[in-house]
Image (cartoon, rainbow, N blue to C red):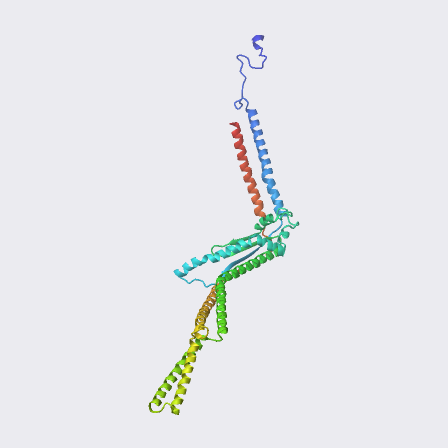
Amino acid sequence: MTAAAEKKPTDGRPGLGEVTPLTPTEKPGAGSTKAQAQALRKKRTRRLIRRLAIFVVLPTVLSAIYFGFLASGQYESFSVFTVQSSEPRPMLGMEGLLAGIATGGGGRNDALTVRDFVLSRDMLVKLDKDLGFIAHYKDRRQDWFSRLNERASFEEAFVYFGHKVYADYDQGSGAITLRVRAFSAERAEVFARSILANSEEMVNKLSDRERRDRTAYAEGDVKRAEERLSRARQQVTSLQQEHADFNPLQSAQSAMEIRTKLEGELAKARAELMQRKAYMQDDAPQVLAAETVVKSLSAQVSSESLRLVDPTKSKGLNASLPDFEAAMVEKEFSQKAYQSAMTNLELARADADRQHRYLAVIATPSRPDESTYPHRKRGILTAFILSFMLLGVGSLIAAAVREHARL
């Protein structure tokens, strides 16, 4: 071969007719592609580890530090109570079932009323005034996340109160389960006992008010009947003083009896006088004596008649009888109305006593021997799961945003 034929091109590519041998496993650019893939996998792995460390491991470690060393222990006191009534329970059977359905809402409403009072602002005011409830939860010795802010307003304290005092109503038994959390077992028990005492006082006040409301109308009737009877008695007394007679009705009856008796004697005397005149002279002593008796009896009859009926209408029983009779009728009717009102009052009081309600404690407030809150293991596990889930959701959102940006 000539020298010109053996000369290679200056650009480094094989000349015409020249073939560069290749190994069977070697492809063009294979080494660089593999290196790039390995570098990409390492980069993604480092990025994933960094994300897990920041968004999963770090929150889990912080929660473990908080729950394990910083979180203040909280003690929970339990108690169970209900609202009972002294009214008789309904009988068994369909009638008793219907009666229980008709009246069962009262006890349920009472229990719900007590539950609302336990969770009310008034209860918080009483607890803070008597036992320093708010000051206990502002104690700076407790961890910052658990205690109440020192500058918290009353409304903020009330919201905090709702996270420390729970009152759960059981639909089946009608009982209320009271749970009170505090930073010490003694204070939890004291707070729970105070809540029960205040609730019992409230139930007693409601019961007393209900009894007063039930008897108020009956007591008003008794008062009105008593005033009416008093006026009727005063009217009768005034008529007695005016006519100088204790009872004109009885006086008139006595006068009638006397006049009737005198009229009978007068009739006998006249008959005897006529009999004597039949066989004696008019100037006979026996006739004169009989005439004297007749005149005397006639005068007495006239006197009694004048006592009963006075033509001048200024004296006599006939002038006092109408007013006195009306006054006596009013007095008698007022007396009966007063007795009826008293009977109704006694019935109302008896019914009110049957409706008496009271707070019955089923389980007294307990004193816990160890803290039950916070749940430390559960809190750490929850922090790990939530952070892991948030990382997954955030990664999906970021991937969707990048994919949308490429389009």
Please provide percent x and percent y for residue 39. 58, 29
Question: Does 6 sit above or below residue 147?
Answer: above
Name, please, the residue furthest toward the right: 141
Count the marks: how many?
A: 0
Whether residue 365 is visible to the viewer of this picture, yes or no, is no
Please tell me which residue lies in front, 139 or 200. Answer: 200
Please provide percent x and percent y for residue 77. 57, 55
Indicate the quadrant where residue 316 lies: bottom left
Q: Quadrant of the N terminus?
A: top right
Question: Does 182 sit above or below residue 29?
Answer: below
Please tell me which residue lies in front, 197 or 170. Answer: 197
Residue at 62% across / 43% down in the picture?
Answer: 62
Please tell me which residue lies in front, 291 or 240. Answer: 291
Please provide percent x and percent y for residue 67. 61, 47
Residue at 42% across / 82% down in the picture?
Answer: 299
Question: Does 189 sit above or below residue 345?
Answer: above
Residue at 54% across / 30% down in the picture?
Answer: 402
Whether residue 243 is visible to the viewer of this picture, yes or no, is yes
Please tell me which residue lies in front, 305 or 358. Answer: 305
Indicate the quadrant where residue 3 lies: top right
Please provide percent x and percent y for residue 129. 62, 55
Indicate the quadrant where residue 64 lies: top right
